[in-house]
Image: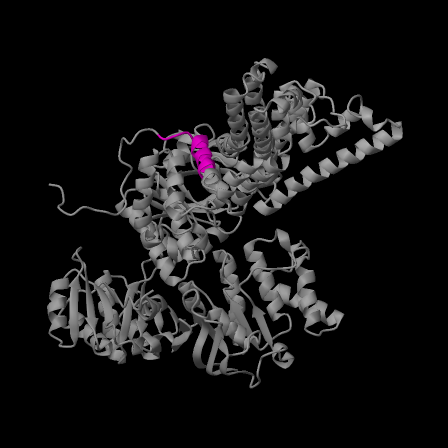
């Protein structure tokens, strides 16, 4: 099911146009929203929530009209902002319960869900502490908890791994993945860190200068023409290149000890030929995988094209 | 078959559990809880009733003295001087600083702290409109302020009803309770609106508090200064400052407006406090429409400022 | 260029870095660690803003603490985001150049060079307060390189940059490194670090947990056996052959039945054997790779294995 349909959305701040007749269909599941600074990612999310009024265009989120059913949209959507934010003077449980009540839960239900959601987000031990005393990583988690407490059908995450250290990032990404893939909550993630998107999302929408630049499954975006292979040797070897050519493999490029090859047969045939080439060259193959571009390369290509 | 092991991680919101409260009520309740759990709030409420406490002590002594024959004449004379409704005016007007303190305690950080913590992003991304937010915050300050202003008055009123009926407590003004019950919410609404409006302009509660306190004292200072200049310029003797144009200046400040409002609503010009004869003239009540208009206008401007300032995201143009 | 010998620094009861002995030379060195691991303290010791409580720190063979001779050859890009907001970017960098002791015409020339280097020459005339996060990072870098230092310390320089900006920034660093400068970069984002360098210095709770090339570091971690993931339509047959090798500890067949994960303590011998299994035993192999030969795996083995 599609979670949002946007048609010709235009948003202006004074004379600056942030979104220019933006048209897109956001599918369900976990979707990444990519784009350089100022491409309109945050503006898009803010417009969905009704924080800014579009100058033209229309859209629906989970069947609710943007700009008309803002309250219904906000009830069905959870928003994790990029900025540091919390409600001052409350403990974590009070804060998340309050967010739940604002989200339309009854008082008793809000308190119960606050405990459950905090536990799920890994703040179980710290839930009676004041939010002001939280570390960066905990603040990110509680932002997720307050977005999740009222049981939204769609989560909007703006830079969820901002400022986290490697372990903290890994845990946050696992949470996002678990929410979207096991708990059936649709997720729209905006991030600068493309490997994060690569690891959590199935689809990507690329925004550039306020317009839709590319959209598709991440696997498709990463695919390389002609399905070449990447072969990594223990050390670089000129003999290997020669032997590979003799085996009928086309050598497309080399960087350090990594060679990009193309065979005309099945994948296992290409690997077998590479093995033979390595054996005759007397070198050791350390890695053999189908060459893909990183999402970053795909992204840079999409916005420069 | 259901799994024998329950999944205790995240789950959907289960149906039922009853409908939630509207956003403004949730926010107002938060304000009330935080206000009523502050000890300073209750201390200030008691301090705010200082005039009544002293007056009650005096009245109690006079009552006791009344038993002896030779002092009974003095006592009736004293009770003759007491205008009951004016005691409510004094009780209210002598505690302006206390009301200001309570307003600052509850309201200075109400929006300013939210601005600092980006809390509006949280509130407004939930199904909670700007009007819900503002009204909720406003109620969160207004109701405790009403309690603080009203509680001493009502206690004093009840005491008087029980003890001084035969001393003409009811004859003085049968509508007194009604007048008091209008004065308290109006004064509370005035303070609440201003402090919320100022709070919305700042990122720190302390700064917002300092700004309101500054406005309060500077407006008071200038109204006194202008009164003196006017009296000098027109060579009005001090005994006549209570009426005519001079009195207008007296009401041109935060506490002046509130005193004026109290005089209008209690329908009195005032008598000397504690029933003690004094020579200083009482300043006549202001024109009712001017006083009411001034209070409503200032409050409306303050609320409008807050309304314009509250937004979920800063838009950089 | 940088030499730490048993250097420690406490702040009252709090320990910043503890008994650090390490040397850093030309090229890019990545400084890794959790929040509070001591990365910023280490940088401040090098820049001479702090003096070690015990031990010594030498930069270019000199004590850096309050030593202008060191400062002249050292550029620092701190992680905190504090600028004189009313200045425009060009003016800020020029003033920093003047502070480095250049006469005005020279300072102007160097400012322009630095702005071109970071790609801000066309946008540097607006006041700093209107800059985006990425522009602020670039200006911070420009002021760090304006006096052409031999040693550059960058604390979280890529934070807040979008992918385009990050790519440009890394290109700049690569050029500087090629010119023989020593660059120390701290970052939380390991894939960024991986694109810049293989040389790491990993701090944990104030102590040096690992230093050197990532692959070397990996090779020393024998607590975790080496893993190889092989994609094949016949995982069971491959597994039986692999187990027969004797030095394979564990074979795990993926539930999808299309790949096999092998754990071994002697990866070199296993890689040598794999072509034989494919060619002589005729087991079709679609692809194979080691999932833990990258920085993220090394990091989580070293840091994640301990209590967080």
B178 or B212: nearer the viewer: B178
A86 or B275: nearer the viewer: B275
Is residue A237 toward the left or the right of residue C247 in the image? right
Stretch of the chain drawn in magenta: B20-33
A178 or C183: nearer the viewer: A178
Residue occupying image coordinates x 59% and y 47%:
B206
Q: Is residue C197 visible?
A: yes
Which quarter of the figure has residue A25? Answer: top left
| Farthest residue, direction bottom | C61
Percent of width and height locating residue C240? 10, 69
- Residue B30 on the magenta segment: yes
Which quarter of the figure has residue C103? Answer: bottom right
- Residue C297 on the magenta segment: no
A264 or A195: nearer the viewer: A195
Q: Is residue C184 visible?
A: no
Q: How many marks?
A: 0
Is residue A210 toward the left or the right of residue C217 in the image? right
Is residue A262 toward the left or the right of residue C260 in the image? right
Q: How is the image coloured?
A: one colour
A163 over B75 or under it: above or below: below
Percent of width and height locating residue B271? 69, 23
A58 over C293 or under it: above or below: above
Percent of width and height locating residue A16? 60, 41
Residue occupying image coordinates x 49% and y 55%:
C162
| Farthest residue, direction front | B69
Q: Mostly what secondary structure, the magenta segment?
A: helix
Percent of width and height locating residue A305? 48, 51
A7 over A234 or under it: above or below: above
């Amino acid at each position: 099911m599609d979670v949002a349909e946007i048609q010709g959305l235009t948003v202006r701040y004074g004379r600056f146009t942030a979104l220019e007749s933006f048209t897109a269909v956001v599918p369900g599941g976990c979707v990444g929203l990519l784009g350089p600074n100022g491409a309109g990612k945050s503006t898009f999310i803010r417009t969905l929530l009704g924080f800014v009024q579009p100058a033209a265009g229309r859209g629906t989120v989970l069947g609710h009209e943007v700009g008309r059913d803002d309250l219904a949209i906000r009830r069905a959507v959870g928003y994790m902002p990029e900025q540091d934010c919390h409600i001052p003077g409350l403990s974590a449980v009070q804060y998340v319960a309050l967010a739940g009540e604002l989200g339309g839960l009854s008082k008793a239900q809000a308190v119960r869900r606050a405990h459950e959601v905090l536990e799920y987000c890994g703040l179980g031990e710290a839930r009676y502490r004041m939010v002001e005393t939280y570390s960066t990583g905990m603040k990110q988690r509680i932002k997720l908890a307050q977005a999740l407490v009222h049981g939204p059908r769609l989560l909007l995450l703006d830079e969820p791994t901002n400022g986290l250290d490697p372990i903290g990032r890994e845990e946050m990404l696992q949470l996002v993945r678990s929410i979207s893939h096991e708990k059936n909550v649709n997720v729209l993630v905006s991030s600068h860190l493309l490997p994060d998107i690569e690891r959590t999302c199935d689809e990507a929408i690329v925004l550039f200068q306020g317009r839709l630049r590319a959209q598709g499954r991440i696997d498709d975006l990463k695919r390389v023409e002609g399905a070449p292979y990447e072969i990594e040797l223990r050390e670089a070897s000129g003999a290997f290149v020669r032997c590979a050519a003799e085996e009928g493999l086309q050598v497309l490029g080399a960087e350090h000890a990594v060679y990009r090859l193309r065979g005309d047969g099945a994948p296992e045939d290409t690997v077998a030929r590479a093995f033979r080439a390595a054996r005759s060259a007397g070198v050791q193959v350390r890695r053999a995988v189908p060459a893909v571009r990183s999402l970053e390369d795909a992204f840079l290509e999409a916005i420069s094209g | 078959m259901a799994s024998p092991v329950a999944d205790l991680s995240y789950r959907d919101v289960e149906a039922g559990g009853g409908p939630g409260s509207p956003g403004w009520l949730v926010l107002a309740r938060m304000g009330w809880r935080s206000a009523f759990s502050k000890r300073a709030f209750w201390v200030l409420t008691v301090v705010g009733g200082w005039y009544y406490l002293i007056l009650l002590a005096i009245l109690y002594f006079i009552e006791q003295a009344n038993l002896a024959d030779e002092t009974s004449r003095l006592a009736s004379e004293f009770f003759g001087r007491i205008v009951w409704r004016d005691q409510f005016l004094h009780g209210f007007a002598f505690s302006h600083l206390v009301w200001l303190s309570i307003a600052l305690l509850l309201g200075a950080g109400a929006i300013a702290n939210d601005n600092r913590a980006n809390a509006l992003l949280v509130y407004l991304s939930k199904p909670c409109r700007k009007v819900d937010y503002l009204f909720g915050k406003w109620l969160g300050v207004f109701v405790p302020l009403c309690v603080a202003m009203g509680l001493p008055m009502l206690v004093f009123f009840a005491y008087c009803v029980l003890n001084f009926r035969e001393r003409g407590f009811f004859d003085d003004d049968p509508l007194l309770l009604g007048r008091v019950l209008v004065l308290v919410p109006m004064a509370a609404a005035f303070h609440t609106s201003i402090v919320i409006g100022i709070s919305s302009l700042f990122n720190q509660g302390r700064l917002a508090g300092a700004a309101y306190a500054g406005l309060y004292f500077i407006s008071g200072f200038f109204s006194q200064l202008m009164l003196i200049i006017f009296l000098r310029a027109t060579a009005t003797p001090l005994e006549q400052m209570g009426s005519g144009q001079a009195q207008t200046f007296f009401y041109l400040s935060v506490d002046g407006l509130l005193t004026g409002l109290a005089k209008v609503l209690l329908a009195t010009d005032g008598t000397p406090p504690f029933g003690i004869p004094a020579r200083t003239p009482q300043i006549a009540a202001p024109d009712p429409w001017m006083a009411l208009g001034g209070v409503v206008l200032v409050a409306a401007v303050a609320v409008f400022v807050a309304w314009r300032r509250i937004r979920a995201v800063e838009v950089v143009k | 260029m940088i030499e730490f010998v048993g250097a420690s620094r406490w702040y009252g009861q709090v320990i910043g870095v503890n008994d650090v002995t390490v040397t850093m030379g030309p090229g890019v060195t990545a400084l890794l660690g959790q929040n509070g691991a001591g990365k910023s303290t280490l940088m401040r010791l090098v820049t001479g803003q702090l003096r070690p409580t015990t031990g010594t720190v030498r930069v270019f063979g000199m004590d850096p603490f309050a030593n202008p001779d060191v400062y002249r050859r050292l550029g620092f890009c701190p992680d905190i985001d504090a600028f004189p907001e009313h200045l425009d970017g060009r003016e800020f960098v020029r003033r920093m150049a003047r502070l480095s002791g250049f006469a005005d015409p020279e300072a102007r020339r160097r400012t322009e060079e630095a702005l071109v280097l970071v790609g801000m020459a066309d946008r540097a005339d607006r006041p700093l307060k209107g800059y985006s996060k990425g522009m602020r990072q670039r200006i911070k870098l420009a002021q760090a390189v304006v006096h052409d230092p031999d040693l550059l310390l960058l604390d979280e320089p890529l934070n807040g940059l979008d992918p385009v900006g990050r790519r440009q920034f890394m290109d700049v660093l690569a050029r500087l490194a090629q010119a023989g400068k020593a660059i120390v970069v701290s970052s939380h984002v390991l894939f960024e670090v991986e694109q810049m360098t293989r040389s790491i210095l990993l701090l944990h709770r104030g102590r040096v947990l690992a230093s050197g090339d990532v692959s070397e570091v990996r090779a020393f971690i024998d607590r975790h056996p080496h893993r190889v993931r092989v994609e094949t339509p016949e995982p069971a047959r491959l597994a039986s052959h692999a187990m027969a090798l004797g030095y394979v500890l564990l074979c795990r067949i993926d539930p999808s039945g299309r790949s096999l994960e092998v754990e071994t303590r002697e990866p070199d011998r296993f890689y040598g054997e794999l072509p034989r299994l494919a060619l002589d035993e005729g087991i079709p192999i679609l692809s194979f790779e080691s999932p833990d030969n990258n920085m993220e795996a090394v990091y989580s083995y070293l840091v994640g294995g301990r209590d967080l």
